[in-house]
Amino acid sequence: MGTLELETGPAKSEALFLKRLQHKFEDEQHNQQLEHLTTSQPDVQTKHIRETCWNIKPVRADLQDQRVCLTPRNHSDIKRYLEIETNVVSIDFSDHLTTSEVHSSLEIINHFIKTAASLNKKVPAIMIQVGSISSQTLMVVGTYLFRNANYLLSMRSAPYLILKGIDSYRTARVWKNMISFAEGELSLVNGTVKAAVVIDESNWTECDDILYELRNHSAGLRISTEDHDYASEIVQSVISVGHRRGSHVLCIRNAENISEVDVQPEAITGFDGMSIREVSAIEKVTSVWNLVMPESNQIWKKRINRLG
């Protein structure tokens, strides 16, 4: 695994690593533009992916149970939320944060992880949520990986991401190539970094294709049940595809004052956990999933995909 000091690795400095990451992104953008010009009928091109048997690479032990994922509402809550006992804590960099808030948040996270590693302290799985791929997004991801990857590995964890704004499998491919490039630069085994993908109206019909592109790096799928009813065709299809490919599928609930009655249908319908914003909802969500899902997840529950 190497030492905890990443600056001794192939990337001699954080600045150089981020610069090389940016150059790689520019190359990927150019390649994607060429692909759009020279290819057509993506459904036909990826038909074999949807019709053949394959699974994503399994996640580490600390991501097997994602029944509660807690996301701070505000930048000022990050430190407090990281200290809370729960399965997963995700830090959202996809909202409109100032440059100062971005760097401050990264510093808080890095200090927490370094301290936990030095004390051999058990902490929740930490996920970094980012928006559509861009130079700014890659700065956040690159900085997080450079500063924290080996510390996380020393705690039997790894760098985990949540990706919003993936509109197609082509965008997922760009992310795959960027993640694999970063792993190579930091001497990490391919597949060390895992990424969950947020699903919505723009990409739900490409779940198979997206998971296939990220099959070595997938941490699951996520979809809002505030925007889509748990019994809707979109939700049922996402759960079906995700579980068929060995992937966790989480529902997203950002509302306040969540009750057990509110979340029980999501647990019963097959979600492997819920992403929430309120600390007060942890006990309620946990109790419902403990009742419905005594195992770490419900991936074993397979459903027939209506789009099949």
Image: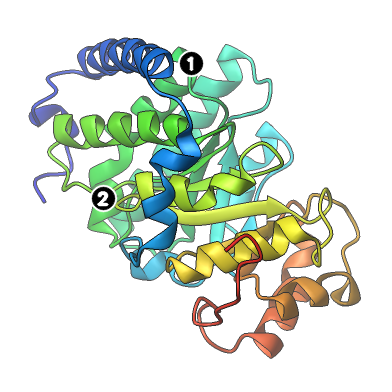
Question: In the rendered image of this protein, does residue 117 appear above or below residue 144?
Answer: below
Which of 106 and 285 lies nearest the eye of the viewer? 285
Q: Amino acid at mark 2?
A: Thr
Residue 291: % across, % down: 70, 89
Identify the colour scheme used: rainbow
For label 2, the residue is 192
* Residue 136: numbered disc: 1
* Residue 273: numbered disc: none
Q: Residue at x 71, y 41 (%)?
A: 201
Q: Where, quadrant-wise, is the C terminus in this rendering?
A: bottom right
Which of 80 and 36 lies nearest the eye of the viewer? 36
Task: Locate residue 17: give its quadrant.
Answer: top left
Residue 295: % across, % down: 53, 86
Instruction: Answer yes or no: is residue 39 visible.
Output: yes
Instruction: Answer yes or no: is residue 87 visible.
Output: no
Left or right relative to 9: residue 120: right
Question: In the rendered image of this protein, does residue 65 appear above or below residue 268?
Answer: above
Task: Locate residue 264: give its quadrant.
Answer: bottom right
Number of numbered discs visible in the structure rendering: 2
Q: Amino acid at mark 1?
A: Gln
Q: Secondary structure at mark 1?
A: helix
Left or right relative to 285: residue 204: left
Q: Residues within 10 Å of mark 1 (few under 14, many from 20)?
A: some
Residue 205: % across, % down: 61, 47
Say whether disc 1 or disc 2 marks the residue closer to the N-terminus. 1
Q: Secondary structure at mark 2?
A: loop
